[in-house]
Structure formats: C-alpha cells, structure tokens
Amino acid sequence: DLVSVFAVAACGGMLAALLKQPVLLGYLVGGMIVGPTGLGLIREVVQVETLAQFGVAFLLFALGVEFSFSQLKKVRAIALGGGGLQIILTIITTVIVCGITGAWETLPAKGVFLGSILSLSSTAVVLKCLMERNETETTHAQVMLGILVIQDLALGLMLAILPALHQPGESIGLALFNAIVRIALFAAGAVVVGIWIMPRI
C-alpha cells in the first residue's frame, strides 16, 4: 500500500506541476483514484492516515522553523482583527442561513457547530502552497499565517465550548475559562521555548 501511495503521489504531483496546478491537487486526485471509493488499490487506510499525520507534523515543524515573531508583529493588527472577525462573521452567517432555511429548526447550536467548521482553514495546505510559490516571507503570507494562528487558537476554544452548548450557561462559561487558561499556558510555554531555549540548542 505504501508503495502505491508514493507512486501515485509522485505521478499526481508531477502531472499537476506540468499542468501548472498546485501539487496538492495532484495528491488529492491521486488519492481519490486509488482509494477505497476509487480503484480500491489502497485498503489499509489506517496506515495511510498515520503516515499523513507524520507528514503534517513535519510540515508544521517547517513552518515553526521559518516563523518570525518580528515579522508577525508587523501584521498583528490585521491578523487579530481580520482573523477574529472572519470567524465570528462566518459563524453568524451560517446560523442565520440555517435559521432562514429551517435546516435545524430548534437547534441553533448545530448552526454554530457548522459555522465553526466552515470558519477554519488548513494551516498545512496553505503553508504548502506558500512554500511552493516561495512566498513565505512576503507580507501577504505573514498576514495569512497570522490569521491561521488565530484560527488554530480559536479551535482550542471551539473544542471546549461546542460540547457544552446544550448545557446551562455556567457550563459554557467554565469550559471557556478552562480553554483560555490552557491556551495561554501553552502559548507562554511555546514563547519561552522558542525565544530562550531553542536558540541555545
């Protein structure tokens, strides 16, 4: 299965490059063709998913290596404001559309859930596209990465709040507080490691 994965990925990537399309598109189409719903050449999906997790981890590590706090500071206002506003407006719009269409009559929490999903982007996919175009150091790339960081932080809040939407208001408030504390501690630890520990290593 792994041989088939690498072979199809290589062929799909080269074909996409020849057509001047994103390499990720070639990977995606190749996976659809040889997957269980296509030709069925790949049967052990668990192995592929495990390999994919390692790939995403290495890709995000590459982002961390090239990440610059000094450059991010220049666009922090746009990243914070734009990223937060984009998430909020997407959720509100989704809830309104669900209410108008009657998709979920008395369960607006499901509209919030769908809006939360639609408001997020894939950091790995965006980063890969930027790296292919050699644009990771540009201003617009830094804005995009800043917004993606905001989305990743918001994901932590969503994972804590969404399960508590059907609970009383006190439960939602407690879940939000716990999530904020954990994210703050993680962010503080990451900053300490990135600024003071990693340079010495």
Image (cartoon, helix red, strand yellow):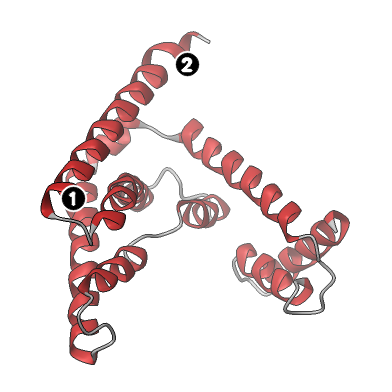
The mark closer to the camera, 2 or 1, is 1
Does residue 128 appear to the left or right of 184 in the view shown? right
Q: Residue furthest left?
A: 169
How many numbered badges does the structure rendering display? 2
Q: CA distance from mark 2 to mark 1?
A: 37 Å
Q: Earlier in the sequence, mark 2 or mark 1?
A: 1
Comparing 153 with 168, the one in front is 168
**In what element is the residue under mark 2?**
helix
Amino acid identity at mark 2: Met
Mark 1 burial class by Cα count in 10 Å: few <14, some 14-19, many 20+: some
Q: Residue at x 46, y 57 (%)?
A: 122
Does residue 96 appear to the left or right of 186 in the view shown? left
Mark 2 burial class by Cα count in 10 Å: few <14, some 14-19, many 20+: few
Residue carrying label 2: 198
Comparing 89 with 140, the one in front is 89
Q: Residue 74 in the image: x percent, y percent?
A: 23, 39
Does residue 99 appear to the left or right of 149 in the view shown? left
Q: Residue at x 49, y 53 (%)?
A: 130
In the rendered image of this protein, does residue 173 appear above or below residue 182? below
In the rendered image of this protein, does residue 26 appear above or below residue 167? below
Residue carrying label 1: 172
Amino acid identity at mark 1: Ile
Q: Residue 159 in the image: x percent, y percent?
A: 34, 51
**In what element is the residue under mark 1?**
helix
The answer to which quarter of the image holds residue 96 is bottom left
Q: Residue furthest top?
A: 200
